[in-house]
Image (spheres, helix red, strand yellow):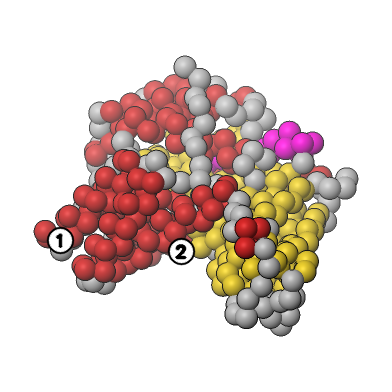
Amino acid sequence: MANELNLTVTLNKPSVPVTSTQQLIYLLIETKPNEVISRTRMPMNLGFVLDRSGSMKGDKIKRLKEAMSLAVGRLNPDDRVSVTIFNDSARVVARNDTLSKQRNLEDQIRRLQAGGGTQMSRGMSLGLREVYRHWNEGWANQLILLTDGQTYGDEAQCLKLAKEAGEHHIAIQALGLGDEWNESLLDQVGSLSGGDADLIESADEVVPLFTQTVERSQQAVVRDAAMTLRLVSDVTPRQVWQVTPVISNLGYQPLGEHDVQVSLGDVDAVEGKAVLVELLIPPRRAGRYRVAQAEVRGEIPAQQTSGTSVRQDVVLDYTQDAAQANRYDSRVMNIVEKVTVYRLQTRALEEARMGDVAGATRKLRAAATRLLELGEPQLAEAAQEEASNLEQSGQMTSMGTKKLRYQTRKLTQRLPELPE
């Protein structure tokens, strides 16, 4: 099948002024499966690893049961599912099998009770073993891990398991509930496995975020996608940012004198994947020039082909018309502003960790101002509060740090509506 992927390239401004110096431009490169591929749904080999330690008592365990019931209800009868629970020990309560054969699954979920300490590696080990048992190259093999607390003494083992999962193409989606868990550890678990980490701020958010994580696993119809950017002479890449589904710094790998490559990972059928590229362009005379060519390649397991690719030229006008040179694409500039906010808070958190209170405070206040302009008053308030905390005590709060770290990543996304 031809044209399995759609590719769109939008510049922050279609024309630049004729000058004698380099200029900075932004490219928004968006890729998404076509309508036929988008209707494909990946068969699932999904393992749930759930924290049931004592801190999960009350609303947390109650909402987790609701979220599990709703998530399982969205799976197909032929999908494979397993459930592992852990505290200071671990137990598989539902072995890996097709959903149609999991006749006691709902009852097992209802029986979940909280108690005990936290040893996350025990749950990860058993949960991954269940996914390994029926690993299939053409399926979405994933682990959804939820915890609300610090694991004790087994962090290195957790990272070892995550690395092994990544080597077997089993992505771990790590969800931290509340403010007591180790965000650095969950971030590493996610990245080492090819997955991600996210914050569930309160028990009331368990259901929508848990369900969204399952849905995205089902929608990942393009695998191991990569973008190659072929640049003409004197065009220089500066940074590459993923902007959907979440904001992150992707970096790039030089392939030659003028080519760079960026790993995109999986591409889902609904949001696709979008990246923002910062390029320095050289001086030119007035005229229309090709400055780059973008190519995206990926594997589509449902098609059982060797892969697919799509290309798009990047063309830019150099003009002496000042009015034309001052026209900007508002959507791209809005995304640039959101990436700027994410960069500000990332640097602020790093400077706070390094003890540069003054630098971190300045960046948090700048981020707060920009968040207000973007219509994000709650995040702006969180940034202001953490700036004040730094000034008064020299430290940021655990929840404030997590909220800024994870919520500014989502400035480009919206949570889906859930049925009543």
Q: Is residue 263 left or right of residue 126?
A: right
Residue projecting furthest to the left: 392
Q: Residue at x 15, y 61 (%)?
A: 391
The nearer-to-camera label among 1 and 2 is 1
Q: CA distance from mark 1 to mark 2?
A: 38 Å
Q: Is residue 39 magenta?
A: yes
Label 2: which secondary element: helix
Q: Is residue 71 visible?
A: yes
Q: Residue furthest right?
A: 1
Q: Which residues are magenta?
A: 35-47
Above/below status of 344 relative to 87: below
> Which labelled disc corresponds to residue 160?
2
The 10 Å Cα crowd at callout 2, few under 14, some 14 to 19, many 20 or more, is some
Q: Position of residue 27 (x, y in %)?
A: 63, 60
Quickly name the residue at label 1: 391
Q: Which quarter of the rendering shows the N terminus?
A: top right
Is there any visible trace of residue 172 in the rendered image?
no
Q: From the top left corner, tell me how far across and down residue 164 is, in percent.
A: 53, 61
**Residue sitting at 84 percent across and 48 percent down?**
3
Reading the chain from its start, which is encountered first: label 1 or label 2?
2
